[in-house]
Amino acid sequence: MTTTPTSSGTSRRGRPGYDREALLTVCVEAFNRHGYEATSMGALSRELGISKSAIYHHVSSKEEILDIALNRSLAELERVVSEAEALGAPAVDELETIIRESVKVLTASLPYVTLLLRLRGNSEMEVKALQRRREITLRIAELIRQAQADGDLREDVDARTASRLAMGMVNSLVDWYRPQDGQPDDALAATVTHLLLDGLRSPRS
């Protein structure tokens, strides 16, 4: 019988047919299909084909499932921003890295990022997650402003508007992209990055 870690670093004993990771995957996909608010533990029980008590061997509540899922996608996106910043590269290069790697995170973890993008702020947990997501967009706006000041991006575009449009394009992938093997899609990441930055680059750069 398998044991898998919980979000707190402890472990729970697994149940036949599902380890904790597989259970989370099914639950997140159910949230995306039916909506988090509309999906009860009873509905998850039917989806999984196990009793509610069996689910509680892996997680303590539906809220814990959401917390794990949101933290997973946000931590990956925040890692992208932190690693790009650590490179110490010009703002335009840091921006390019963030966009490219964000697409890779999305394509590799599509169900989890999809759940994040569909939040409505109906709970304190969701509000905090939305704020963390907003911080990423604000960082992109800062990088666009700096790249404009450096002469690498055109100055006739509002930085905040450009950042929202950029993330809007990246986030729209959840509506149509279908991953083949759960791996990052490097070609798609390159395409999105080129389309976004080619429209923003200064003629002088």
Image (spheres, helix red, strand yellow):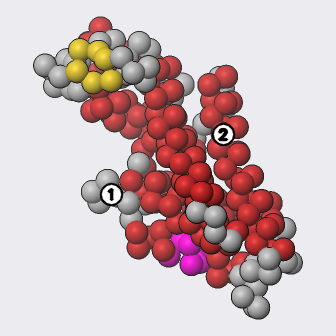
Q: In the rendered picture of this protein, how many numbered marks are placed on residues?
A: 2
Q: In the figure, 67 relative to 188: above or below?
A: above
Q: Secondary structure at mark 1?
A: loop
Q: Is residue 201 left or right of residue 30?
A: right
Q: Secondary structure at mark 2?
A: helix
- Residue in the foreground of this view, choosing between 197 and 145: 145
Mark 2 or mark 1: whose residue is earlier in sequence: 2
* Residue 137 belongs to the span the image colors magenta: no
Q: In the figure, 194 relative to 144: above or below?
A: below
Residue 175 visible from this viewpoint: no
Q: Position of residue 14 (x, y in %)?
A: 22, 18
Q: Amino acid at mark 1?
A: Gln
User: Which residue is at 59% across, 77% downward?
Assistant: 195
Q: Position of residue 109 (x, y in %)?
A: 41, 48
Return the mark for residue 183. 1
User: Which residue is at 63% across, 29% downward?
Assistant: 126
Dot 1: few (<14), some (14–19), or many (≥20) neighbours within 10 Å? Answer: some
Mark 2 lies on residue = 132
Q: Position of residue 145 (x, y in %)?
A: 81, 66
- Residue in the foreground of this view, choosing between 15 and 132: 132
Stretch in magenta: 191-196
Q: Main SS type for the magenta part? A: helix
Q: In the figure, 198 relative to 167: above or below?
A: below
Q: Is residue 102 left or right of residue 139?
A: left
Q: Quadrant of residue 52?
A: top left
User: Which residue is at 76% across, 91% downward?
Assistant: 204
User: Which residue is at 64% across, 64% downward?
Assistant: 88
